[in-house]
Amino acid sequence: MKWKKLGKIFDPTEHHLPNNCIEYAQSPQVVVKDDVVRIYFSTRERDPKNGKFLSHVAFVDMDKKFENIVKVADSTVIPLGELGTFDEHGIFPINLLKQGNEIFAYTCGWNRRSSVSVDTGVGFAKSTDGGLTFNKLGNGPILGPSINEPFLVGDAFVQKYSDTFHMWYMFGTQWQAYEAGAAPDRTYKIGHATSTDGINWLKEDGIQVIPDKLNADESMALPTVVEHNNQYHMLFCYRESSDFRNTSSRGYRLGYAVSNDLENWQRDDEQVGIDVSDDDWDSKMLCYPHLFKCDGKVYLLYNGNEFGRFGFGLAVLED
């Protein structure tokens, strides 16, 4: 693959976001409409009760040349969960799939824990108003922990091929404190599940579909898949599981895998075709990729430094 970077196209600090959110536009994911591309993202507010972050979903509408902003959401599109639920403290990310006149939303809800920082699950919601608002199926997740995937199930990306829904997602394999007295860090891998209705899923419990490159403690997140030239192409982000926040060489980069059957994937990061820049907003990190097609072109949305604190950028595939 060979990508042409088009630069950062949205900076949350330059706009008035709902819920007093002032920074972060993480994991941009799209619904392509007739006249605009609606880009959903997760942003953050400070919880007035304790000063910690809460993650909300908002969106920005852009023209199809990605040069002009048409609208920025004035309210969050989906409420956070009730007390004690899996998405009580945030939704990050959200993945959208158009189905007729409806839009399915696959959310990654998260909630704080005491022994570790967080746990996650995959939720489901549906929009009947073009994606302005979403109604949850219920208070619980549609995909969560299991025997071989005991925690951190999330980051769902869903596509429908023929009559089958395919989901690629992350699942946690361990929490580990890498230094004495340090808070535990997480490790997670990419899994696969299928469904006939998009709600009830059969997952390959504990089977890692993308092999490790760095070591057994490598973390992989945010899989995204596009069909192009009769093959299926996956991008994802990967990093070391420790010292990744402040050391650029251990932080997120984008990985690549290719498949002919949606089941067996060959990883070849040398073919990803995009890397950090020499300077500026994406010079230390690339993360949270999203592949999509618009007007015959294949595009890539992604976050850069500080996990998308100051927005997201766009690249276009050059065949």
Image: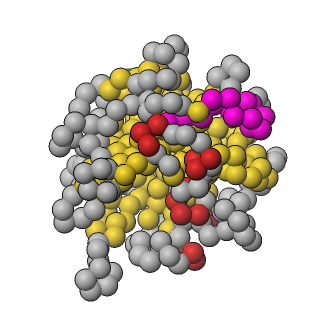
- Note whether 245 is above or below 151 in the view shown: below
Relative image position of residue 206 (x, y in whole percent): 32, 54
Q: Is residue 201 left or right of residue 275?
A: left
| Residue at point 32%, 26% (across, down) | 136
The x, y position of residue 257, in whole percent, is: 59, 55
Name above or below for residue 99 compared with residue 292: above
* Front residue of 297 and 211: 297
The answer to whether residue 3 shows anywhere in this view is no
Q: Is residue 162 left or right of residue 209?
A: right
Quadrant of residue 231 within the rendered picture: top right
The quadrant of the rendering that contains the N terminus is bottom right
Residue 259 painted magenta: no
Q: Position of residue 286 (x, y in %)?
A: 60, 61
Which residue range is magenta in the image? Answer: 58-71
Residue 63 painted magenta = yes
Q: Is residue 80 above or below residue 162?
A: below
Say if 162 sits above or below 260 in the image. Answer: above
Q: Residue at x 37, y 27 (%)?
A: 125
Q: Find the residue positioned furthest to the bottom.
A: 180
Q: Is residue 222 visible?
A: yes
